[in-house]
Image (cartoon, rainbow, N blue to C red):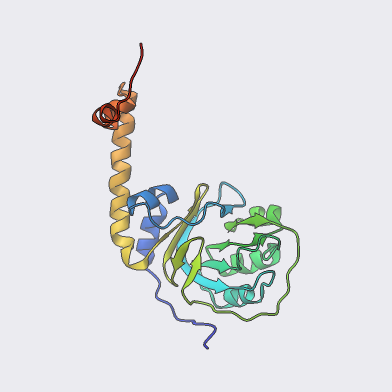
Amino acid sequence: MIHVRTRIQRPDPALVAGLAQYSSATIHEAQGRLGAFDSGIKPIDRSMSFCGPAVTVVCAPQDNLMLQVGIHYAQAGDVLVVSAGEFTEAGTFGDVLGTAMHSKGLAALVTDSGVRDTADLIELGLPVFSRSVCIKGTVKETLGPINHPIVFGGQLVEPGDLIKGDADGVVLVKAADVGWVIDACAAREASEAELREKYRAGGTTIELCNLVEKLAAKGLLVED
């Protein structure tokens, strides 16, 4: 078995920048309510956001050996997506590895395990998204795959898929879909901007959300 695949197809940087301007929620809705990672995976600081191609890493629970290997092989702008069996009682990543990532220009770490040294990581400015914060240490013993498809946070993640994270959560866009998803995000934002203006002008939710007929069909009764 080949553990580490070093060559992956990354999206054009212009597409990465185009997707990065939209929120995780907008992207999720615009691509048909697809791609959202498990809501338990959140940033260690709400100001953190990122967008970049996935480098997939599989670690054994409470073991960060392959995370360190993944940092070695990842390139500037990459997002390390680290599956560790959703084991939350381990601090698999901290400020030392954070410094290694930040120094290489990596975009973010997303893990279904725990992290620690969060104050230092926040000061460092590296976006870190995790399922937990935990001080418990790890070992470095078990080999695992890097840049193979993985199931992470309820989504199938393939190397090179684009990952966007912000205060609300993390969403995946398949590499082949990035172009049309950007267009769909732009259209959605334009529609929402128009809707907000109509609310400011006095429009109501029932009218603007086209609920009159639906509510009538469901038999909604209103007493004055």
User: Can residue 78 be spotted in the picture?
Assistant: no
Q: Position of residue 81 (x, y in %)?
A: 53, 66
Q: Please, is residue 100 above or below residue 4 in the view?
A: above
Asked if residue 37 can be seen in this view, the reply is: yes
Q: Position of residue 181 (x, y in %)?
A: 32, 56
Q: Write down the quadrant of residue 96 in the picture.
A: bottom right
Q: Residue furthest bottom?
A: 1
Above-or-below relation of 89 to 210:
below
The spot of residue 171 in percent (x, y) is: 45, 56
Instruction: Out of 13 and 92, give the one closest to the viewer.
Output: 92
Towards the viewer: 81 or 20: 81
Question: Which one is nearer the viewer's eye here, 163 or 204?
Answer: 204
In the picture, which quadrant includes the C terminus?
A: top left
**Does residue 32 appear left or right of residue 143 in this picture?**
left
Q: Residue at x 59, y 62 (%)?
A: 112
Q: Residue at x 48, y 77 (%)?
A: 148
In the image, farthest residue toward the left = 213
For the residue pair 155 and 42, the one nearer the viewer reads as 155
